[in-house]
């Protein structure tokens, strides 16, 4: 019997010390759309088009750490903007990004060191997921 793996729909990414919820499912849909358009035939083709390794692109789609520069290059190749797939998670009412959506379908994530850190979160099936 084939083992089914569950792919993350959302992950929390930290860039410049600010957490964002990244919509991985939307990124995967955009990858398929670009493949249908003929832009590239695989993740390896996407990687070649932006000048990174296939494993770096795989890390991104798996919700694992990538730099902000790599994230922006991947999103550009997918014809997505950061604002379309990343929602700021902040509890600071003075922050122009607005109130936090953290805790809605996500468990709290510790801050990781560095400027391009990423922490994975899983959605709670009973509480929903931030959109």
Image (cartoon, helix red, strand yellow):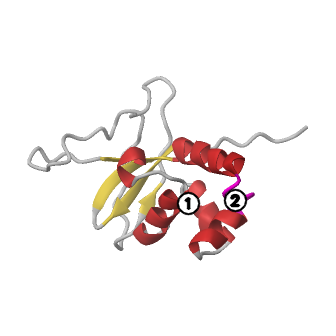
Please tell me whether residue 4 is drawn above or below residue 72 in the rendered image. Answer: above
Q: Nearer the viewer, mark 2 or mark 1?
A: 2
Residue 20: in magenta span: no
Local packing at callout 1 (Cα closer than 10 Å; few below 14, some 14-19, many 20+) is some
Residue 8: x %, y % from top left: 57, 44
Q: Which corner quadrant of the image does residue 40 belong to? A: bottom right
Which of these two is toward me, 58 or 11? Answer: 58
Q: Which mark is residue 41?
A: none
Range drawn in magenta: 38-43
Q: Which residue is mark 2?
A: 40
Residue 126: x %, y % from top left: 47, 23
Residue at (34, 37) in percent of width and height? 103
Residue 50: x %, y % from top left: 57, 71
Asked whether, in this view, residue 65 is left or right of residue 92, the answer is right
Which of these two is toward me, 6 or 26? Answer: 26
Q: Which residue is mark 1?
A: 60
Residue at (56, 42) in percent of width and height? 25
């Amino acid at each position: 019997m084939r083992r089914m793996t569950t792919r993350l729909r959302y992950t929390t990414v930290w860039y410049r010390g600010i957490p964002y919820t990244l919509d991985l499912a939307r990124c995967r849909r955009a990858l398929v759309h670009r493949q249908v358009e003929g832009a590239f035939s695989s993740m390896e083709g996407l990687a070649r088009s932006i000048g990174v390794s296939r494993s770096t692109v795989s890390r991104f789609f798996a919700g694992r750490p990538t730099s902000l520069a790599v994230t922006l290059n991947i999103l550009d190749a997918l014809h997505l903007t950061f604002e379309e797939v990343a929602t700021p998670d902040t509890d600071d009412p003075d922050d122009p990004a607005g109130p936090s959506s953290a805790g809605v379908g996500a468990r709290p994530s510790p801050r990781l060191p560095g400027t391009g850190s990423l922490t994975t979160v899983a959605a709670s099936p009973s509480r929903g997921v931030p959109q």
